[in-house]
Image (cartoon, rainbow, N blue to C red):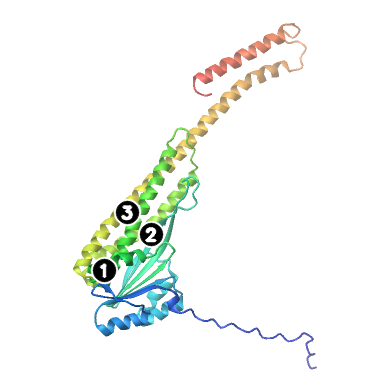
Amino acid sequence: MPPLPSLRPARKPVPTRKVVPVPAARAIVDCAVYVDGVRLPGRFTHSAALAEVRSRGEGFAWVGLHAPDADQMNSVAKVFGLHELMVEDAVHAHQRPKLEIYDDVLFLVLRTVNYVEHESITTANEIVETGEIMIFVGADFVVTVRHGEHSGLAGVRAYMDAHPQRLALGPTAVLHAIADHVVDSYLAVTESVERDVDLMEEDVFSPRGRVAIEQIYLLKREIVELRRSVNPLASPLQRLGHDTGVGIGKEVRRYLRDVQDHHTIVAERIAEFDEVLSTLVEAALAKVAVQQNTDMRKISAWVAIAAVPTMIAGIYGMNFDQMPELRWSFGYPVVLCIIATLCTGLFVTFRRNNWL
């Protein structure tokens, strides 16, 4: 038996939208050619910049990108001959600080940090935010890729443009300038965080201060994030400053060793913050325990005072015919006086012993 025809109207095919790739120029923040440390006039695309350098046989191109997508990064990678693994890291970000060498191209990943301003440390939800900068350094080019709104390099480029003698050292001078800028920002952030740690310490050890332990944990969590961003950079800086096989000149290595010294100072500060905050957690917990003990003593003292009238009233509340002074006309006032005397005596005793 042949199948019956369907009564439903046939669906029209949904037209698929063709995704038009965004050109790489949309992700490029700045692109320039430097010869003898001086920036050449005019505007260049990334391919034109590299072609200009190689046609001259001197100088280098510096291309800066902000949060490129895969198509944009692949377009740049084809021009500069970047390895696909480097491209993948640059697109997806969230990398630990590291240094890798692919043939004759250096690949350095830096984590940037930024201090988030807040009115009070006890009400802050975030103290440190992070971003990333990837640097590709070849013989005649530098490509920088940054992620995060606070990690701009316009100031670094302006500084280097004003110091052509530094740019004349080649592309590795740009690598040093960016690393120096990032580590200097670490120093600024740790100074701001140090103020927060000092305020937290002051509040914890204040006689009447009541600091929520959750805020100490928040600050400690931010310190952990700061440590994860800063400490892994020690090994790449050590290698850049001392290893002669990475293709960095002697003069630039001297500058990089200075950056390494600053990085060591930052790492030591972060370790101190971690130790102080661990101590503050213990102090805060001890303070809470002492406060709870004090509260329990007060509660126990008031319970003891309340037990006196409760006990006497309970005895005379029993339904017996033969009880002492039950028929005495002064019995009620005398019992009230006894209760008041005992309660007053207990109150004075507890107050003298600092229980109340």
- SS assignment at label 3: helix
**Label at residue 266:** 3
Q: Name the quarter where the N terminus is drawn.
A: bottom right
Q: Earlier in the sequence, mark 2 or mark 1?
A: 1
As rendered, which of 65 and 211 lies closer to the eye?
A: 65
- SS assignment at label 1: helix
Residue 270, horizontal then vertical, whole percent: 35, 51
Q: Residues within 10 Å of mark 3 (few under 14, many from 20)?
A: many
Residue under circle 2? 229
As rendered, which of 218 and 340 lies closer to the eye?
A: 218
Are discs 2 and 1 less than 8 Å apart at CB?
A: no
For image coordinates 60% across by 17% down, the residue present is: 343
Give the vertical position of 65 relative to 289 (above or below). Answer: below
Structural distance between the alpha carbons of marks 2 and 1: 23 Å
Q: How many marks can you see? A: 3
Residue furthest left in the image: 250
Callout 1 amino acid: Ala
For image coordinates 56% across by 18% down, the residue present is: 347
As rendered, which of 40 and 25 lies closer to the eye?
A: 40
- SS assignment at label 2: helix
Residue under circle 1? 173
For image coordinates 52% across by 81% down, the residue present is: 20
Give the vertical position of 4 relative to 245 (above or below). Answer: below
